[in-house]
Amino acid sequence: RPTPKKPPQGGGKIDIAGVKQIIAVSSAKGGVGKSTTAVNLALALQANGLKVGILDADIYGPSIPRLLKITDKPTAVPNSRRMYPLKAYGLMAMSIGLLVDPDTPMVWRGPMAVSALTQMIRDVNWDMEGELDVLVVDMPPGTGDIQLTMAQQVPLSGSVIVSTPQDLALIDARKGIAMFQKVNIPILGIVENMSYFACPTCGSRHDIFGHGGARSTAEEIGVPFLGEIPLHMDIRERSDAGDPVIVSEPESDHTAIYLSIANDM
Ligand code: ADP
């Protein structure tokens, strides 16, 4: 694995101790499988030998506690305003969903949301068990002020964009890419989720939402295309059960896909 790229420094960005690089997983719209992809990629980076943390910054629908079956509340570091992360499947994890009433964040205004999110990154002892190679941030969906301000304030090494193959999702993905480019955050690549359906009965592949859109968009914009994740019942069922496929089905085809994407990131 090449030496991690140094995050762009300066520009008034907050200082984050104990983390070598921070990678945002974003999508320009909700429901494309951003959180599911973020969790499986974090576990894949770990399987590839890195020390990894995951931060759920999705204030509109924090789902990391469910996806990683986290039920404990975070504990405070004695005599400080800091918190310890929770540990799930070897990942150091923190979620906005563990800190607030799940019904409240929707009404947060931009500046409040940004300060809560940056605090959550800064005030957690991510290096509780040693320095992290990578902190994966499950970003809120969309390209509004919250996302832009986060991209400006957090020293991100890069961003992975998750999209489905539909035209609409891809138009949104372009907006997401433009947002990160505006603040000079490198795009590590586009992942096409729910890319195709591999029928377990007949064995053939069905391109339910069309095919090839994300790859051609990536080529057009000049960013890497990282891979196609199929729409698969096990991915959904395991996610809902807090039992990610990459852990529960290590030999499956979809696990191999997550591992290969993590390797190329
Ligand atoms: P987002 O974070 O973009 O809102 P989620 O990760 O919560 O999306 O996923 C939305 C729903 O789609 C969840 O029920 C999840 O289990 C399901 N899902 C995501 N990716 C896949 C996939 N590749 N195959 C099957 N179901 C998926």
Image: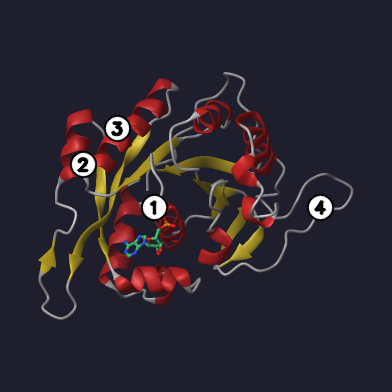
**Residue at disc 4, secondary structure:** loop
Real-space CA distance between mark 1 and mark 2, rounded to the nearest whole angstrom: 15 Å
Contact, mark 1 vs mark 2 (Cβ under 8 Å): no
Closest to the observer, 84 or 128: 84
Q: Is residue 218 above or below residue 132?
A: above
Ligand 1 within 8 Å of disc 2? The answer is: no
**Residue matched to label 3:** 174
- The residue lying at 33 percent from left, 59 percent from top is 258
Q: Nearer the viewer, mark 3 or mark 2?
A: 2
**Residue matched to label 1:** 31
**Residue matched to label 4:** 77
Q: Is residue 22 above or below residue 259?
A: above
Closest to the observer, 209 or 92: 209
Real-space CA distance between mark 2 and mark 4, rounded to the nearest whole angstrom: 47 Å
Contact, mark 4 vs mark 3 (Cβ under 8 Å): no
- The residue lying at 36 percent from left, 42 percent from top is 161
Position of the C terminus, as image quadrant, is top left
The residue most toward the bottom is: 201
Specify which label sits upstream in the sequence, 1 or 4: 1
Question: How many residues crowd mark 1 within 10 Å: few (<14), some (14–19), many (20+)?
Answer: few
Question: How many residues crowd mark 4 within 10 Å: few (<14), some (14–19), many (20+)?
Answer: few
Ligand 1 within 8 Å of disc 1? The answer is: yes
Q: Is residue 155 above or below residue 36?
A: above
**Residue matched to label 2:** 167
Specify which label sits upstream in the sequence, 2 or 4: 4
